[in-house]
Image (cartoon, rainbow, N blue to C red):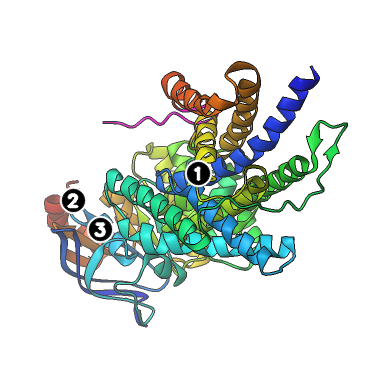
Amino acid sequence: MEGLIHQIISGIATGGIYASVSLALVMIYQATHHINFAQGEMATFSTYITLTFINMGMPYWAAFFLGVAVSFGIGVAIERILIRPMGNAPILSAVGVFVGLLLVINSLSGWFFDYTIKQFPSPFPDQALLGGYISGHQLGSTGVTLGVLVAVYLFFRHTSLGLAMRAAALNPVSARLVGVRVGWMLALGWGLAAAIGSVAGCMVAPVVFLDPNMMAGILLYAFAGALLGGIDSPLGAVLGGFAVGVIENLGGAYLVGTELKLTMALVIIVSVLTVRPSGLLGRTVQSRV
Amino acid sequence: MPALLEAKGLHAAYGETKVLHGIDFSVEEGGVTALLGANGAGKTTTLRAICGMVRTQGELILGGESISGMATEDVVRRGVAHVPDGRGTFMELTVEENMRLGAYIRRDRGAVDKDFDWLFGYFPRLKERFRQQAGTLSGGEQQMLAITRALLLRPRLLLLDEPSFGLAPLIVKEIFNILRRIRDEEKVSMLLVEQNASLALAFAEDAYLLETGRIVVSGKAADIGKDESIRRSYLGY
């Protein structure tokens, strides 16, 4: 029983990481109807940037927030320079660009920061808490993730800019007619997604160590989470991310063993797509032909 | 007094397809101008041209300033509000959020809240539905919401694209009564596109008649309404 509780709690902790990457995926999907395959590599790159700041002697949280800000800028720049010119390009071109972006950023990570596995510091105390069920880092990173999710929710629900971003994604024509600069809202969405990725990267790196392929597996889990919750539902993505974290951990511990954990993500993806493609909270889109 | 909006030799095209072939018209300050014509005459395109939603050539002057080729977002910032065809409702958002978006470019938050109450005076039903998802509104209510959203910009010029479209006669009457009150009480200038010619001519002071992208008749709405030959050949009633 104790083992089970332990697995569930650490599942929630990793689920938080998946939830934030899922949320980043959904944010870009809502605005552009594309899955950003490079989301994970962008987060890895951001984590390297933060590590560079830390190695320069900055205090952890200063480096963390500076890394988030720089990632935001990189996200905006990617949208402006690479994504925007694609405008109405067919879906395959978009997929091609995203895959290309994945490879380019992955190689840049290796080129700038080399391929050796690096340690990444955790800002949280290294001790077991709550009667040994959870480590300081797990508790801290879950707190940070929840903080990000709440902040994102409040931003979209209660600020004029957040409302404008939703409007731009839902109905770009009408949004322009009330004066929303739709192009910039998309860029802002990319910036936010990159910033969230940066947080996720910094929270997961102390656990899995930092190398250019760090996020590859995580992106897969996050994608499973986004699909499970419904690819067009931010709340669904978050819940899905947490659920996948718990499922993955329990499956790894009692069902398939840690070696085959990643297949759990694929099983979830395939099951959702066959049984309920709209996900748990997603809307079924009907289009007239 | 110079006109609020003046178009000279306005052309517009969707890709290769030309829709407007050099039209001239103007909208007087504080007045209502109607744009009439059959399906495909270019009425909606004219409104889109003013808002920079289609590629145009020719001159568009708003209050002395050229707005030709300007991006939609910037035309809106100069006080042009558009009630688009299809009403442009943000279906997934609430009525309140739709209204907040109407005032998106305004920074005077307190005045916007007062304007909510001002507009509830005209459209009490929106107040009842304030927290409801806009997609659940009836067609007439969505039209009222579209007009409200446009007025929340505090526009100098209100573009109305077929506010009667797809609505029951009683609702149409109600909406036009409110538009009349808004014109008289708030002195908002309007450019009205309508297929329902008798309705539009009774409401407007000036009118233009479009046929396949050209203006064929222009003048005082009352005169056009009385002219039997125009009525028979173009307006069909």
Residue behind mark 1: A25
Q: How far is mark 1 from mark 2, CA to CA?
A: 42 Å
Residue behind mark 3: B45
| Secondary structure of residue under mark 2 | loop
Q: Amino acid at mark 1?
A: Leu
The chain letter for the residue carrying disc 2 is B
Image quadrant where residue A280 sits: top right
In the image, B120 versus B73, the foreground residue is: B73
Q: Is residue A185 left or right of residue B127?
A: left
Farthest right residue in view: A131
Q: Is residue A74 left or right of residue A204?
A: left
Q: Amino acid at mark 2?
A: Gly
| Secondary structure of residue under mark 1 | helix
Instruction: Answer whether residue B86 is visible to the viewer in this image.
Output: yes
The magenta segment is A278-289
The reply to the same-chain question for discs 1 and 2 is: no
What residue sits 62% from the left and 31% below the top? A245
What residue sits 20% from the left and 60% below the top? B209
Q: Amino acid at mark 3?
A: Thr
Quadrant of the frame with the N terminus of chain A = top right
Q: How far is mark 3 from mark 2, CA to CA?
A: 9 Å
Of the image marks 3 and 2, the number of the one nearer the N terminus? 2
The chain letter for the residue carrying disc 3 is B
Position in image of residue A30 (x %, y %): 46, 44
